[in-house]
Image (spheres, rainbow, N blue to C red):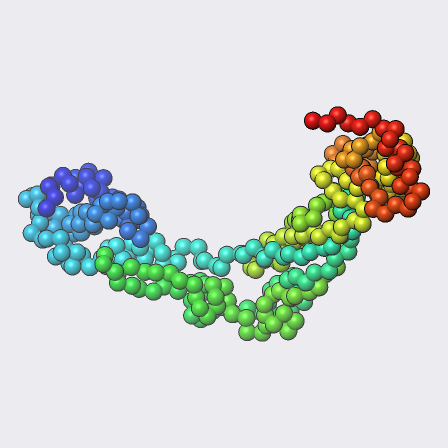
Amino acid sequence: MATKQDYYNILGVPENATEEDIKRAYRKMAFQYHPDRNREPGSEERFKRVNEAYEVLSNPDKRAAYDRFGRVQEEWGEAFEGFGFGGLGDIFEAFFSGTGPQARRAPQRGADLHTSLTLSFEEAIFGGERDIEIERTEVCSLCHGRRSRPGAQLTQCPNCRGRGQIQRNQQSLFGRFVQVVTCEQCRGEGRLNTDPCPQCRGNGRERLKRRFQVSIPPGVEDGSQVRLSGQGDVGAGGGSPGNLYISFTVKPHPHLRREGDDLVLDLPLTFPQAALGDTVDIPTLNGPHKLKVPAGTQSGTELRVKGYGVPRNRGRGDLLARVQVLTPEHLDRRQRQLLEELARTLTRPPQD
């Protein structure tokens, strides 16, 4: 059993504390150390000691005996059985009984929506505008989210009396406590819709198809996505709307492919073109472009056309024409003779 000074120290009050001082201190400490709220090690034991101290000091006869003899003739089990958690139940009922501001179901954010858009290669590079159509949840246009027929009034829920919550008394190891749960009849609204809106059937929201224009930023890549804030489903209970996410699929180009901010073109050349040099027309996203091939160009060489690539923060990337020197697979008699004559005049590379 605790000593004389322990009970007062446990509650943090002086020996001459009034009944109101003791009750106020107990409220604070019981709320702080209740096992349902405090999971820290030792909180349960501290909670028991707080209740033991309050059970003694809140009873005038027990307090007088304790002040005189320094103890009371009760063991822990008897004290808790006699205490019956009446004081704790009353206090937690005051904390959780809903006598404060009436609780209502909290607003819920609307769901995010996802859709996809297929772009041409040119649209992905330069951006643009596209029309899309989605189906989303919006506030009912007839009742404007009130859920009832225009002009009708919501009635107070008889089950919770407008609180949106009901109390359930439960018995635990530490005694009786009050649990507050959402009212099942009104689902936390506190009011019943006896005359629902005929358009949304009392939901306050309706499913509609919407068509609007989307801006495609320049340089989007295959598999990337953009977010349109607030274009998703409207939230319940006045909650904020969700977002709309658009994923992009980019069609391949017949001649070009993308590497970062650059565009790449495979440029096939004949041996004479590569050896003697030439000027060839190549496809670009800006239309045909004449590209000068220097004499002696080797296979694998990259010929750069500046400013013909992907738009970026400053300017554009480049177009890279990668040379592929073609070896003829079939030669007629005259072509073979010419190549043989050429071969005899060329200096062979040194052998290792």
Does residue 225 appear to the left or right of 131 in the view shown?
Answer: left
Instruction: Tell me the quarter of the image containing the C terminus.
Output: top right
Residue drawn at point x = 17 percent, y = 56 percent: 80
Q: Is residue 45 left or right of residue 285?
A: left
Count how many numbered circles sit on residues in the image.
0
- Which of the 4 quarters of the picture holds residue 350? top right
Looking at the picture, how far across and down is residue 322, in whole percent? 78, 37
Q: Tell me if residue 153 comes above or below residue 179 in the rendering.
A: below
Q: In the image, is 47 to the left or to the right of 136?
A: left
Q: Answer with the quarter of the image where residue 338 lies.
A: top right
Q: Residue furthest right?
A: 334
**Foreground residue, 277 or 42?**
277
Q: Where in the figure is residue 186, as x and y percent of width and height?
A: 48, 68
Place residue 7 in its image quadrant. top left
Task: State the residue in front, 62 or 96.
Answer: 96
Q: Position of residue 270 (x, y in %)?
A: 86, 39
At a point 50% along the width and 64% down the height, the residue shown is 189
Which of the pair 277/189 is nearer the observer? 277
Identify the residue at horizontal 19%, vertical 47% (top origin): 49
Can residue 169 be spotted in the picture?
yes
Q: Is residue 139 visible?
A: no
Task: Report the residue at 15% width, 50% height from top.
Answer: 56
- Where is residue 284 shown, x and y percent of the image? 85, 42
